[in-house]
Image (tube, grey):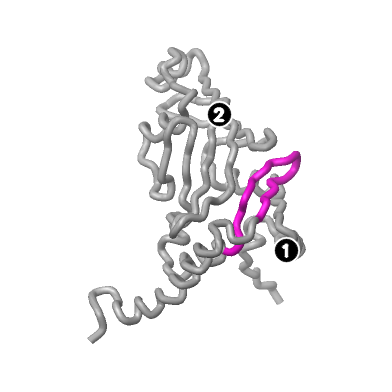
Amino acid sequence: MKAVPVKNSTRRIGLDPAHVLRLAAEALVGRLSIPLSLLREWAARMSGKAEISLEPASPGLRVRGEAHALGAPISFSARIDADGVRVEGEERTVRLTLSEVEVSTPDDAPGPLADAIRGGMIDTRNPATLVGNMMSLPDFIVKADGQTVVIDLMRIPALAKDQRVRMAFATATSYLCIKNIHVSEGSVDLRLALLPGGPKEAVLSTARAAIMPAVRYLWPAGGPRA
């Protein structure tokens, strides 16, 4: 009999049940360690045609890559440092700091972008501002200025499109959330904190999650129930 493949999201991202159990055990003592190899696997899938490499630059991460843009081959590298998750109201934000940015292209590469890079017209000191001015940013990036990029996790499509999942995530993270992110030689170490937004924020998040189902029932889309 031919075996039927089992659909398992943890397998798709490189985790097996043993890893899941280990992560759960670590969470109980206030920390999580995610293998850097797992992030490399995720980056390879998400980067499309670009070649991306991730290396530790403690406490942050160094990203190197090569891609084609406007007809020219571009090499780039940057250091990324991440704060913990800030819990405030219905926002769950992470601040990324981009520094030590380098961009280069071959001397014979064609196109306006290659000319701008060779001419020193690309402001690598303020990479977030540069990216924000050059392209339309997704909704979950709420700030891109100077060296700082701020991501609101609540606006990521997987959460934003499902109100129940969104409320559950907000409630859970009001009780236990990531306080610090530190990259070591082979892993990304997450330090967890209880009540990161304080007891009041946890109570308010719980209340919102409890009330919203009733609100949706009494006032469904299109107006209140008759």
Q: Would you call the spot at circle 1 few (<14 residues within 10 Å), some (14-19), or many (20 or more)?
A: few
- Determine the image quadrant of residue 129: top left
Question: For this rendering, which residue is in front, 69 or 104?
Answer: 104
Can you say which quadrant of the picture contains the N terminus? bottom right
Asked whether, in this view, residue 186 is left or right of residue 65, the answer is right
Task: Name the residue located 67 percent from the left edge and 43 percent from the top edge.
Answer: 182
> Looking at the magenta stretch, what is its main secondary structure?
strand
Up-down: is 88 above or below 204? above
Asked whether, in this view, residue 53 is left or right of residue 71, the answer is right
Q: Verify whether residue 180 appears in magenta.
A: yes
Q: Which mark is residue 28?
A: 1
Q: Verify whether residue 188 appears in magenta.
A: yes
For the residues labelled 1 and 2, the Cα–Cα distance comes to 34 Å
Q: Secondary structure at mark 2?
A: strand
Where in the figure is residue 52, as x and y percent of width and height? 59, 36
Where in the figure is residue 112, as x and y percent of width and height? 37, 20
Task: Name the residue located 54 percent from the left edge and 42 percent from the top edge.
Answer: 47
- Determine the image quadrant of residue 217: bottom left
Q: Which residues are magenta?
A: 175-192
Task: Name the residue located 45 percent from the left edge and 15 percent from the top edge.
Answer: 120
Q: Amino acid at mark 1?
A: Leu
Q: Earlier in the sequence, mark 1 or mark 2?
A: 1
Q: Amino acid at mark 2?
A: Ser
Is residue 16 visible to us here?
no
Q: Which mark is residue 99?
A: 2
Question: Which mark is nearer the camera, 1 or 2?
Answer: 1
Q: Which mark is residue 86?
A: none
